[in-house]
Image: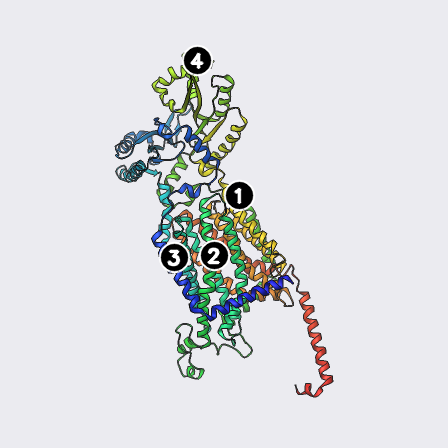
């Protein structure tokens, strides 16, 4: 009872909304247009790109950022005079270059070219440079060498750091130096053809991240043109009166102007653009065009003899209830993604924009597109051509004209037979579904193959879900042909044997002269290659035959002898002394650790971090470990999965809470199963397609929830409410009612993704793969899996058959009574 009251109340509200729009179409057409012009111009004037890449893609709240603050407070950069590891707490400004020799050559034999490159860099003006040493890659050791002598190497890596000390002026100088550094590397590459130079600067990641937006501009326009063409063609009919090609085109334009308005609001509120927002037009288009095509299908289902205003109101009553529900779920899921629980700023910003886009999308569909539907309905009622907007001539006049003229100006009377009351049945998609596809998919011989297909689908999905890997590698978001990606590929190939330098910070006073403390330090550093003042000092004491078993001797020899030797002076920056009266104390110190890694360097570094952190709490030595890359890696997998888990939980919670409130409980039950199957399918298949769990794929997974509900909900609710005798007839009716809109929308959506293939960017490749799987899995469920599985399982349709039989019997009894009482009247009839 409550379900019926709610449903009828919503339908009544949407009917009145449709009447309001049909009576004031100019107002509802003008207001959205004015909003778009106002906010669109604001978007152009206030456009500003996001300049902090770490803020976008690194977890906002992580232990690594706290550790960086502590390390920076203990060992500030402006107090580090050493030329080694000067950037250990922040990447700062830097320039890196990898020199790679041709295959088979030895980079060590090309010292002249290396030194020329090095001298050219050091001679550059503007900025204070710091050469921190080099690393060798592709090393071949001398056979049977006890001290691991190097026989040859394929590559060498040199890094130059700029000491800007946090000054804004020096930071600008550093930025200029980095630009000149990249230009210099390109110039040196031309001069040294026997060497391959791969350069990287601190701004390179930011530049190559935003390069995706520049590369994708023309492709997004091509995508829009493809969607416009597909929507226009799929809305056309041979019937020049009832075909609505311009409505398909105007529907796509409605979604476009709503996205432009949302962008204007975003920039007015001081939002900054980043390349992840490139997915919003595609997300909004997938939802907006669904409402457009459903309204067109709802218009076709209305009675043609009604006034056009009543037909618009009936179409709203039929369609807008479900569209309102799905739009609300979009808002809920992306609203949860924009909540404080989301730890990735890029995901949060995207979800905030998507919420605004969904609200505007909904408003523009029922206002702007509804007004267009009103004008199109008025043209149809007055018998105007749907393309040329001219009066359609009479059948007698057409009979005297050539065949081509009859084809162009035909209003469908010739195609409509005497027993067919709905001329809209001639729409080519609806005709194909009614006459061919519905009979084929419900054939008893096809069903076993569909079950086997679903088992294969489920198997691959489950297999992929077991192989999920996080995408903490920022290379996944960069343009694929950029210098940063080339540098990262070479570095991964030749310099993956060792982890980045990890800072080991002891932040509390420690009895370094104590043997047990020395043993604890050795145990913690075991398995690492350590650059440690402690080890060097112990070795110095042993070689010098000096005894320092107490605090005063230990610190006295350290300050007066060890740190004054030239070869150990650089360790002064690694020890913090404090003086209390005449007594000196060591209150903090740092060491440097390098771990041996294999090919999967990033995963092993994360494992090292996760193993060392618990030891800092369980051991007597209080320490932290840090490297700038930890900021991006720290709990990244948890940070990116939380938004999709929260969104999925929100969707399921809403569906469960409305189990006995919305339309039919079995409809919600089937919808939960369908959405879960599609979501797990997309997740598993994208993993098998080498897509990692980064911020883009997570956003696509959140979108998959909504896209699946958008398309499955109308089909399922129509099925459970159908009153035909059998489940097979009910699913045929559902496909005939909603199949056209679903096929139109998914086809337009998938065709619009094709240009993304030609954007040379890892970000757009991920977007294409995920959205292609989303559309394909949804289409598979709507047209293959659900039509078959719904014929096996509840809801049963036997009670409808009993009700119809009871009504037929009652009608027969009434007719018999009429025959007995007034036989003449019945005979006359």
Q: Colour scheme in the image?
A: rainbow
Disc 2 crowd rating (10 Å Cα; few below 14, some 14-19, many 20+) is many
- The mark nearer the N terminus, 3 or 4, is 3
For this rendering, which residue is in front, 21 or 518? 21
Q: Nearer the viewer, residue 724 or 136?
A: 724
Residue position for label 3: 39
Which residue matches tag 2? Answer: 358
The secondary structure type at the circle numbered 4 is helix
Callout 2–callout 3 Cβ contact below 8 Å: no
Measured along the vertical axis of the image, is residue 808 above or below residue 78?
below
Q: Earlier in the sequence, mark 1 or mark 3?
A: 3
Per the model, the C-alpha gap separating discs 4 and 1 is 57 Å
Q: Is residue 627 left or right of residue 616?
A: left
* Residue picked out by circle 1: 467
Name the image quarter holding residue 39.
bottom left
Give the x, y percent position of residue 146: 42, 21
Q: How many marks?
A: 4
Q: Which callout, 2 or 3, points to the residue nearer the camera?
A: 3
Circle nearer the N terminus (2, 3): 3
In the drawing, what numbered circle is on residue 167?
none
User: Pointer 2 and pointer 4: residues touching (CB < 8 Å)?
Assistant: no
Residue at mark 1 to residue at mark 2: CA–CA distance: 33 Å
Q: Position of residue 768 (x, y in %)?
A: 44, 52
Q: Can you see residue 571?
A: yes
Residue drawn at point x = 42 percent, y = 32 percent: 500
Q: Residue at x 47, y 29 (%)?
A: 624
Q: Quadrant of the C terminus?
A: bottom right
Q: Which residue is mark 4?
A: 553
The vertical placement of 21 against 114, above or below, is below
Q: Quadrant of residue 260?
A: bottom left
Q: Earlier in the sequence, mark 4 or mark 1?
A: 1
Camera-nearest residue between 492 and 28: 28
């Amino acid at each position: 009872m409550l379900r019926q009251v709610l449903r009828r109340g919503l339908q009544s509200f949407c009917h009145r909304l449709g009447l309001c729009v049909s009576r004031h179409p100019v107002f509802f057409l003008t207001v959205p247009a004015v909003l778009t012009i106002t906010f669109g111009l604001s978007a152009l004037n206030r456009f500003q790109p996001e300049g902090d890449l770490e803020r976008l893609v690194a977890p906002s709240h992580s232990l690594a950022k706290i550790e960086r603050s502590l390390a920076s407070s203990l060992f500030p950069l402006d107090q580090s005079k050493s030329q080694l590891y000067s950037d250990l707490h922040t990447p700062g400004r830097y320039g890196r270059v990898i020199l790679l020799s041709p295959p088979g050559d030895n980079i060590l034999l090309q010292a002249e070219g290396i030194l020329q490159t090095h001298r050219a860099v050091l001679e550059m003006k503007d900025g204070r440079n710091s050469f921190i040493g080099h690393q060798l890659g592709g090393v071949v050791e001398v056979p049977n060498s006890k001290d691991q002598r190097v026989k040859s190497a394929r590559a060498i890596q040199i890094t130059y750091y700029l000491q800007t000390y946090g000054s804004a002026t020096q930071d600008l100088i550093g930025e200029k130096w980095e630009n000149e550094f990249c230009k210099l590397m390109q110039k040196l590459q031309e001069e040294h053809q026997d060497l391959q130079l791969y350069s990287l600067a601190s701004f390179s990641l930011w530049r190559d991240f935003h390069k995706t937006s520049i590369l994708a501009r023309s492709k997004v326009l091509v995508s829009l043109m493809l969607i416009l063409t597909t929507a226009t063609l799929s809305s056309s009919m041979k019937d020049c009166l009832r075909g609505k090609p311009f409505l398909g085109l105007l529907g796509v334009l409605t979604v476009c102007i709503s996205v432009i308005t949302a962008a204007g609001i975003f920039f007015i509120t001081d939002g900054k653009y980043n390349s992840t927002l490139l997915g919003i037009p595609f997300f909004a288009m997938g939802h907006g065009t669904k409402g457009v095509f459903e309204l067109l299908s709802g218009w076709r289902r209305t009675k043609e003899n009604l006034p056009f205003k009543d037909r618009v109101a009936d179409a709203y009553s039929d369609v807008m209830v479900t569209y309102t529900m799905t739009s609300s779920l979009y808002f809920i899921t992306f609203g949860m993604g924009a909540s404080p629980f989301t730890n990735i700023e890029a995901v949060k910003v995207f979800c905030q924009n998507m919420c605004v886009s969904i609200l505007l999308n909904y408003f523009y569909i029922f206002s702007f597109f509804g007004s267009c539907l009103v004008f199109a309905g008025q043209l149809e009622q007055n018998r105007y051509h749907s393309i040329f907007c001219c009066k359609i001539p009479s059948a007698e006049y057409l009979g005297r004209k050539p065949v081509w003229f009859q084809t162009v100006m035909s209003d469908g009377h010739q195609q409509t037979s005497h027993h067919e009351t709905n001329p809209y049945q001639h729409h080519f998609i609806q005709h194909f579904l009614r006459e061919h596809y519905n009979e084929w998919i419900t054939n008893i011989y096809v069903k076993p193959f569909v079950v086997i297909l679903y088992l294969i689908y489920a198997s691959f999905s489950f297999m992929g879900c077991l192989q999920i890997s996080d995408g903490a590698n920022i290379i996944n978001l960069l343009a694929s042909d950029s210098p940063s990606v080339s540098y990262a590929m070479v570095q991964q190939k030749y310099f993956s044997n060792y982890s980045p330098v990890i800072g080991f910070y002891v932040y509390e006073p420690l009895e370094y002269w104590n043997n047990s403390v020395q043993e604890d330090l050795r145990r913690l550093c075991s398995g690492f290659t350590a650059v440690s003042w402690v080890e060097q000092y112990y070795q110095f004491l042993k070689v010098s035959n000096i005894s320092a078993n107490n605090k005063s001797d230990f610190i006295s020899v350290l300050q007066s002898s060890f740190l004054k030797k030239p070869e150990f002076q650089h360790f002064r920056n690694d020890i913090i002394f404090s003086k209390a009266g005449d007594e000196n104390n060591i209150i903090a110190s740092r060491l440097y650790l390098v771990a041996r890694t294999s090919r999967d360097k990033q995963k092993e570094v994360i494992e090292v971090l996760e193993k060392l952190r618990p030891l800092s709490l369980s051991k007597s030595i209080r320490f932290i470990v840090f490297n700038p890359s930890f900021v991006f890696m720290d709990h990244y997998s948890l940070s990116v999965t939380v938004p999709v888990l929260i969104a999925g939980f929100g969707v399921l919670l809403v569906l469960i809470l409305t189990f006995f409130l919305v339309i039919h409980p079995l409809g919600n039950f089937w919808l939960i199963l369908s959405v879960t199957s599609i979501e797990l399918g997309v997740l598993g298949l994208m993993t098998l397609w080498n897509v990692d769990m980064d911020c883009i794929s997570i956003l696509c997974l959140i979108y998959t929830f909504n896209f699946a509900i958008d398309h499955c909900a109308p089909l399922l609710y129509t099925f459970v409410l159908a009153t035909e005798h059998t489940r097979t007839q009910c699913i045929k009716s559902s496909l005939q009612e909603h199949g056209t809109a679903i096929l139109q929308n998914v086809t337009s959506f998938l065709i619009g993704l094709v240009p993304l293939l030609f954007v040379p960017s890892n970000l757009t490749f991920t977007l294409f793969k995920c959205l292609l799987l989303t559309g394909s899995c949804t289409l598979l469920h709507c047209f293959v899996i659900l039509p078959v599985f719904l014929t096996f399982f509840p809801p049963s349709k036997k009670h409808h058959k009993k009700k119809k039989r009871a009504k037929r019997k009652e009608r027969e009894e009434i007719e018999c009574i009429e025959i007995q009482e007034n036989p003449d009247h019945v005979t006359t009839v």
